[in-house]
Structures are given as C-alpha cells and as structure tokens.
Amino acid sequence: MDGLSDGGGLRVLKSFTICNTRLAVVWRRAVPRWVYIFAIYRGRMPIEPGDGVTIEYVGRFEDGTIFDTSRPEVAREHGLIEAQGVDVSEYAPLSFTVGAGEIIEGIDEALVGMVAGEEATITVPPAKAYGEFQTDRVREYDPETFEGMVGKEPEVGTHVEAENGLHGDVTAVRDDAVEVDFNHELAGKTLVFDIEVVDVR
C-alpha cells in the first residue's frame, strides 16, 4: 500500500501496524499548501496470542451430534435448552483472550492466523480438548460413607464435588458401592467445532 494515491490528492507515504491496528502516514493536498496527517484505521489483521476475540461456535461429536453452541437457534433446533436446563440467554458469543488458557487448547491454536469474519471447521483430539479418559478417576465409595459426605442417598446422575475440588457424577449404585466418575464429561472424546470469528480486539 505504501506510495499509493487515491487520485484525489491523497497519497499514502508509509503504513505500519501497532497492536493489531494499522496506521498510515498520508499526504493530502490542502489549499494553499500540502500538509501531513495521520490516518488510523482498523485492518483485518491475523489473530495473534494475546488478542481478545469473540467467536460464535457449534460443537459436535464425530457422529454429528451437537453438544454445545453459542447460537440460540441451533440450541433450540437440537433440544439443548431442555436437555441442559439453562435459559436461552446462556447461548451467546464467547469472548476470551487467545493463548491465555481460557478456552481449550485446540481452539486456542486454531484461531491464531484467522481474521475477523473468517469461518472454519476444526477437529480437536482429546489431548487438546478435555484430556483422555483416566480410569483412576473412577472411584468407589461405601454407600454410608458417600451419604455422609454428600448428605443424601446416592442416585445415578448425582453431581458431587470432592474435597480436592474435583467434580464428578455418580455413574452406578450397588448395594456395596457407589461409583463416581471424576473425569470431565467430554474426556476421551474427539470434538468438532464450527467457529466464526466475530471480533478481534
């Protein structure tokens, strides 16, 4: 772009980028003399670590089943609102800082180099999503011990929090044991995301 003219008395002498904003030094014809001015405008600069971004997304399993989304219309169509028991307002664009560990690693890495308005479909393996399924995170408790810790009788699906901060769900209840899975519910799964970059800051 350096050295270009718009044909109307505006000539770009030099352009450069600072903090994801493109600046241009221009020379505009004024009456009765030439003057230097600065023109500052937003360019579609590639995303870099440290940039703030807002994205829309649809997350699905490899078989096509949608498990999460930022788009209310998709949530309605696929019954997520009823299944997840949340208000429709919870489905909204997601904002975060790239590279700050605020989102799963696979999405973090895929965003680098994209620009505002760009769309992509990415496949994220377990290692860069919610980790591999770990059998040692499935633990058994004596029913009486479990009831004493949680304060109620065990039922499959009950969500619990251990003293070390781990969250888990009761996956089986037998006469002699209660099984609790402390793996993330998406552990061990390859995830596919359709993402759209809405904004870059």
Image: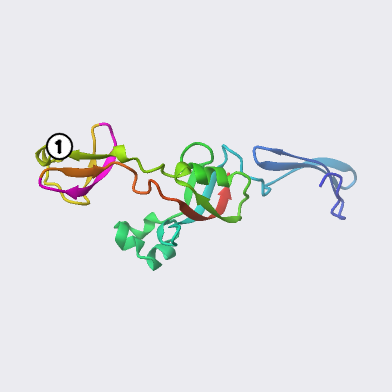
Question: Residue 145 location, x and y as percent?
Answer: 12, 37
Residue 201 sits inside the magenta stretch:
no
Residue 174 sits inside the magenta stretch:
yes
Q: Is residue 73 left or right of residue 169?
A: right
Name the residue tied to disc 1: 149
Q: Is residue 28 left or right of residue 166?
A: right
Task: For label 1, count other residues whose C-alpha is less than 10 Å away and answer few (under 14), some (14-19) or many (20+).
Answer: few
Residue drawn where x is 46% and y is 40% of the image: 102
Question: Residue 110 location, x and y as percent?
Answer: 56, 46
Give the farthest residue toward the right. Answer: 32
Seen in the picture, residue 60 relative to 48 is either above or below; the reply is below
Give whichever of 21, 168 is nearer the camera.
Answer: 168
Question: Residue 87 location, x and y as percent?
Answer: 33, 58
Give whichever of 164, 85 is nearer the camera.
Answer: 164
Range drawn in magenta: 164-175
Kindly state the secondary structure of the residue where label 1 is placed: helix
Which amino acid type is marked by label 1? Met
Q: Is residue 18 visible in the rendered structure shown here? A: yes
Residue drawn where x is 16% and y is 50% of the image: 155
- Quarter that holds the C terminus: top right
Say which quarter of the image contains residue 40.
Answer: top right
Q: Is residue 103 visible in the rendered structure shown here? A: no
